[in-house]
Amino acid sequence: MFNDKAAMGEVFSERLKQLLDAEGLSKSALARSVGASPTAISLYVRGRLPEPNILLGIARTFNVSMEWLLTGEGPMTRAEAKTEIGAAANLESYGLPEEARLLLDVYFELPTDLRKKFIGGMRMMLDLDQEVKKEKVEKLLEAIEKKG
């Protein structure tokens, strides 16, 4: 069902209306909070899907998970999502550094269909980092050879 952008837009629209009503927040106030225009917020209320940065801002403003916001599935709040993740993975017991836990938090807040893209992006960053390191080592070896 959620491969259908229109269906996801409908669910998103309903969730956004629900959150605006529950919080008593105006569209203008939400727009200021997330860096969008009031016109854009009106479009989102009517079913248009926002850009990822705006979607993240809306999720953070209302403290809800992006998956719930887009699909109505999964835990509603970010706290519920983190509790579910913590219980499932018991992250604290693995002694993961704070940065790793933050990455996992971001990962699990994403809708399921965006998680593969997130991992792909992280892999691309790691590959680029390896390329930079390789270039630095090659330059260092060249400099050593020239001096030697």
Image (cartoon, helix red, strand yellow):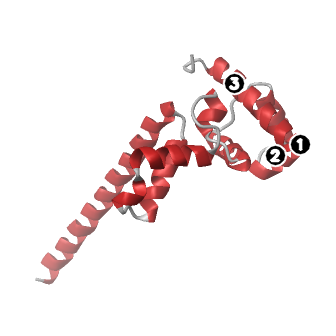
Q: Earlier in the sequence, mark 1 or mark 3?
A: 3
**Foreground residue among 104 and 81:** 81
What type is the residue that disc 2 sits on? Leu
Which percent across, then down, holds residue 69? Answer: 66, 34
- Residue at 45%, 57% in the rendered image: 101
Label 1 packing within 10 angstroms: few (<14), some (14-19), many (20+): few
- Which quarter shows the C terminus? bottom left
- Residue at 80%, 30% in the rendered image: 45
- Which quarter shows the N terminus? top right
Q: Nearer the viewer, mark 2 or mark 3?
A: 3
Which percent across, then down, holds residue 19? Answer: 78, 38
Question: In the rendered image, is residue 40 in sight?
Answer: no
Disc marking residue 26: 1
Proximity of marks 2 and 3: CB atoms separated by less than 8 Å: no
Q: CA distance from mark 1 to mark 3?
A: 20 Å
Which percent across, then down, holds residue 18? Answer: 79, 33
**In this figure, which residue is indicated by the disc labeled 3?**
11
Q: CA distance from mark 2 to mark 3?
A: 18 Å
Q: Secondary structure at mark 2?
A: helix
**In this figure, which residue is indicated by the disc labeled 2?**
30
Q: Earlier in the sequence, mark 2 or mark 3?
A: 3
- Residue at 46%, 42% in the rendered image: 118
What type is the residue that disc 1 sits on? Ser
Quadrant of the rendered structure where residue 138 is? bottom left
Label 3 packing within 10 angstroms: few (<14), some (14-19), many (20+): some
